[in-house]
């Protein structure tokens, strides 16, 4: 629809790369926590869920079914 996704930070880019349809949001969150050594699991979980929901709302990701699996 002519929409562009621009200006992702390093964490957002990581989530985008991981949202390939093979991982759940929980798996993506665990990878982000490990990669960026973030102390607040609750904040990262909320941020990843919010970001993925925003990408779905923009049409950048499509709900793929299963346990909150996303695909591009």
Image (tube, rainbow, N blue to C red):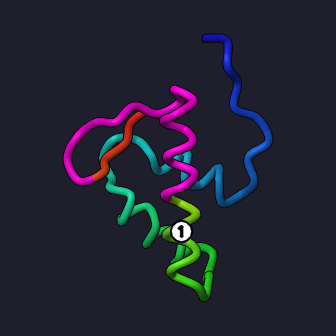
Residue 56 is situated, as x and y percent measured from the top left of the image, at 48, 36
Is 47 located above or below residue 3 in the figure?
below
Q: 10 Å neighbourhood of mark 1: few (<14), some, or many (≥20)?
A: many
User: Which residue is located at x 73 percent, y 46 percent?
Assistant: 8
Q: Quadrant of the C terminus?
A: top left
Left or right of residue 21, residue 42 in this image: right
Residue labelled with disc 1: 32
Residue 68 is situated, as x and y percent measured from the top left of the image, at 30, 51
User: Which residue is located at x 39 percent, y 31 percent?
Assistant: 62
Verify whether residue 52 appears in magenta. Answer: yes
Residue farthest left in this picture: 66
Q: How many marks?
A: 1
Is 15 located above or below residue 54 in the figure?
below
> Which range of residues does the magenta coloring cover?
49-67
Residue 29 is situated, as x and y percent measured from the top left of the image, at 46, 67
User: Which residue is located at x 39 percent, y 58 percent?
Assistant: 25
Left or right of residue 3, residue 40 in this image: left
Is 32 located above or below residue 51 in the figure?
below
Residue farthest bottom in this picture: 39
Verify whether residue 16 appears in magenta. Answer: no
Which element is circle 1 on? helix
Residue 69 is situated, as x and y percent measured from the top left of the image, at 31, 47
Left or right of residue 70, residue 53 in this image: right
Nearer-the-camera pick, 37 or 67: 67
Kindly indicate the quadrant of the structure image that contains residue 11: bottom right
């Amino acid at each position: 629809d002519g929409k562009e996704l621009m200006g992702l930070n390093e964490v957002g880019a990581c989530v985008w790369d991981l949202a390939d349809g093979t991982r759940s949001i929980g798996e993506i969150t665990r990878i982000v926590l490990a990669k960026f050594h973030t102390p607040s699991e609750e904040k990262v979980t909320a941020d990843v869920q919010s970001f993925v929901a925003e990408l779905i709302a923009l049409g950048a990701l499509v709900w793929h079914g299963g346990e909150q699996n996303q695909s591009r």
